Every structure is written in structure tokens, then in C-alpha cells.
Image (cartoon, grey):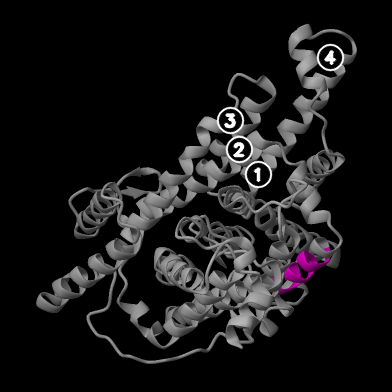
Amino acid sequence: MIKNFFEKRFHIQARGSRISVEVVAGITVFFTAAYIIFLNPSILSSAFPSELRVSLTIATCIGAAVSCILCGFLANLPLIQASGLSLSALFVYTICGEYGYSWQAGLAAMLISGIIFIILTLTGVRERLLNAIPRDLKNAISIGIGLFICAIGLENSGISLYGAFGSFTSPMALMTIFGLLLIVVLTIIRFRYAIFVSLITVTLLVILIVYTNPNYASKLGVSNTFSFTFDYQIFGKFTEGFGHFFGKNGPTATQDLPAQITLFALLLLSIILVNIFDTIGALIGVIKHGNFFDQNGRALGVKKALLSDAIGTTLGGVFGYTPVTTFIESNVGVAAGARTGLAAVVTGIMFLIFIPLAPLTNLISPAATAPVMIVIGASMMRYVVDIDWKDPIAALPAFLTVVVMTVTKDIFSGIAIGFVIYTIIDLAARIAIHFGRCDPGWAARYQLDHREPLLYVFGLLFILYYSLRAGFGY
């Protein structure tokens, strides 16, 4: 009976798989991506009170579990969906940092943006936008996010401090380098769980060092005392954040209502656009890797996968986790034989099983998570070769996207500059072609490349965004 249920729900045999293969693939991919359980709270700890670290870990597990299970049942695809590092960085450095909102307001904004996501997904706008973004700009966004994540890892390790050289000889830096080398060696010998094993190994070494010499606790970013306290205080805290948008406690408390509404709109636009672009590369990559296409060559389950992502993001505001995205590690599950959503459901259940171990997060040193961030950032450099650097229309926007995102530590600004410059150059090129001012061969090739009108709409939106910010002094 159970076998019949799985077959009817997931069409396992029709996709050339077996229940046992799906289960093993789901467990395999969990251990490949389990680092997010420790890494996400580490990034968010800069914006949340220290006593909420265990709560953040529990919330991260809940978010991953809910999103994976939803995606498995709705889209029937073996996708891992969990809190994205770029979106967590946006939460810390833009929402709570640049805009000055509280973490409660940030969660409330996540809830509202999630509802907007659901509407955009159901109406097909989100899918159209994914198709509207030029390939070179998609790749540049992925590269910029990778460099940004790598930069955070280097700063957490002490190797780089605020753009300057830090130290290679501090305990934190030495442990980071050890973890980094361990990942490289394990990857060379094709060990699938290199990242997870490095994280656990460095953590155990840090615990051993602090146990034998408590003076190293502060140097390695951990406490020399530990209490196994299971505490989940973050649930429902988004309700305290609504007053920060238009009340007397937020960053616009001294501003008039139009200014408060403007900043709130800019905040939502930041979350929506970063979330839309963050999921592109992984989702497309997994679909290509697993050949999840119908007879007409259309990708299977994309709209439903985006819907599960949107629902997961909405619930994040309630449960206390940052917006979810599709993980590139989903490819590990596909390589292990996963072909259906059953693998995603199994992965989601694994995240639920880990919840009782959440208090262990207090033992995780930045030296354990920094190597993971550096390696993930480095892995996203593979998109560099996919950009047509000889195409003047693609090269400059792609370059500026990467540079601005990395230098300013602002993912949204990087995406914005890329869109604005691309739109301006694209329109200028079309005008030049119209008046016969371009090389005939290049013009003929370019005229075959049709643009989705949404590309220009979002280019204008970004221009309006920064015009409003300048007008209101933000």
C-alpha cells in the first residue's frame, strides 16, 4: 500500500527510479547541505541577540524541512530549499544594517514579501522575469554573490578585516586555513561530504583546544561554558516589527508618512528582487542536470518549485528564518539517482530530525564556518567562463554587477547597477542598429536576440528606486 502511494504520488518508476534510490539520495544530499544549519545562524548572529542563536538554528531547520517537503509534494522535483546565504546577508547588512530596521521588522518584511511572491508566482510574473534576464547578467549576479559570501568568510576568519589584510597567524585564521585545506583535500579524493566533515572536524578541534586551554575561547569565537538549553523564542516575533515601519521606533520615526512608506517600499523591493535572482542559477542548473523536461522541451515543475519557495519564505516571517532558495547541492542528489520529489521529502525529514540537536550550534566557531563560506564563494566563480566578455553590451554590466556587489557589500546595489547599465546600453545599441551605425555582422546577430519587455520595466524600476532614495535622503 505504501509503495502504491509513493508511486501514485511521485511517479517513481515512470522516471526510472526506485524508492530505495530516492531515500538514499535524499539522505546523501542532506549531509552535503547540512552546513546551512550552522552557517545561517552564524551569519544572522550579527543582527539578532546572542541568546537567540539556538532559536535561529531551530528556525533554519524548520524552514528547510517545510520548503523541501513542500517542493517534493508540489513540484515532484529533488530540490533542496533552505535559507539562502545571500538573503541572510541581505537581512543583516541591508535591512538591519543600511536601512536600520530591527530584526523583528525584518521578519515582518519577509512575511509580506513572501505573500507578494506567492501572487507573482501564481500570476506567472516571476517565471517571466526569470526568462527575461539575459544569461550574462544571471551569471554575473551569481559571481557577485559568491565573492560577497567569500568576503564575509574571510572577515569572520580574521584573514581580512574591513577590506584590509588581517592575520594568517591568529588562532582563528590558522583553524580556518586548516578547515579550508581539509575541504580541498577531501574534494580532490571525491569525498561527497567534504564541507560537512570539515565543519565538524574544525568544531571538534576547537572544543578540544578550549577544553585544554580556556583562554583560547575568545580567540576562537566560542564560549568556554556550554549549556544544552533547548530554547525557541523567535516564533511569532514578526508581530513586534510592524510598528517599526510606520511607528515611532523605526529608522524613519522622525520622518513624515510619505518618507516612511517610501523606505518600506524600497525595503520590500530589495527582498523581492534579490530573492528572485538568488534562485535562478541553482534551479536551472538542477533541471538541466536531471534532464527534467517534458516532451516539448519545457522544464517540469518550475512554477510549483517557485511556489513552494514563496510559501516557505512567507512562513519564514512567522517561524523566524530568512527567505528560502534552491540549493545547488541538489545536484548531488540528482547524481546519486534522485529523480522525484520523494528525495526532497526525505531531506526535509532529515532536517526535522536534527532539531533536537540545535543547542550544539553554540559550539560552532567562526573558524568552522568561514572555510565553508570561502569554498562556496569560490565554487560560484565557475560562471565567469559563461559570460561573453567580447560582447560590449554584456561585458560592462556584468563586470559592474560583480564589482559593486563585492566592494559595497550590497547585493541589491550590484543587481541594480547591472540592470540599469544593461538597459541603457541595450537601448543605445538598438538605436544605433536602427540608424545603421553598427557593424553589419554584429547587428544581424543582435537583432535575433529578442528582449522581454520586463527587462526594461525592471531597469526603470531600479532608476526610480535610487531616485526616490536620493529624494528622501536615504
180 is within the stretch colored magenta: no
Q: Is residue 105 visible?
A: no
> Which of the marked residues, 4 or 2, is nearer the chain's N terminus?
2
* Disc 4/disc 2 C-alpha distance (Å): 24 Å
Residue occupying the point 75% across, 9% down = 441
Q: Which residues are magenta?
A: 109-119
Which residue is under mark 2? 401
Residue bearing the label numbered 3: 387
Label pair 4/2, CB-CB below 8 angstroms = no
Q: Is residue 43 shown left or right of residue 114?
A: left
Q: Closer to the N terminus: mark 1 or mark 4? A: 1
Q: Are marks 1 and 3 in contact (CB under 8 Å)?
A: no
Could you tell me the amino acid type at mark 2?
Thr
Mark on residue 415? 1
The residues tagged by marks 1 and 2 sit, at their Cα atoms, a distance apart of: 6 Å
Q: Circle 3: is it few (<14), some (14-19), or many (20+) Cα within 10 Å?
A: some
The amino acid pointed to by label 4 is: Ala
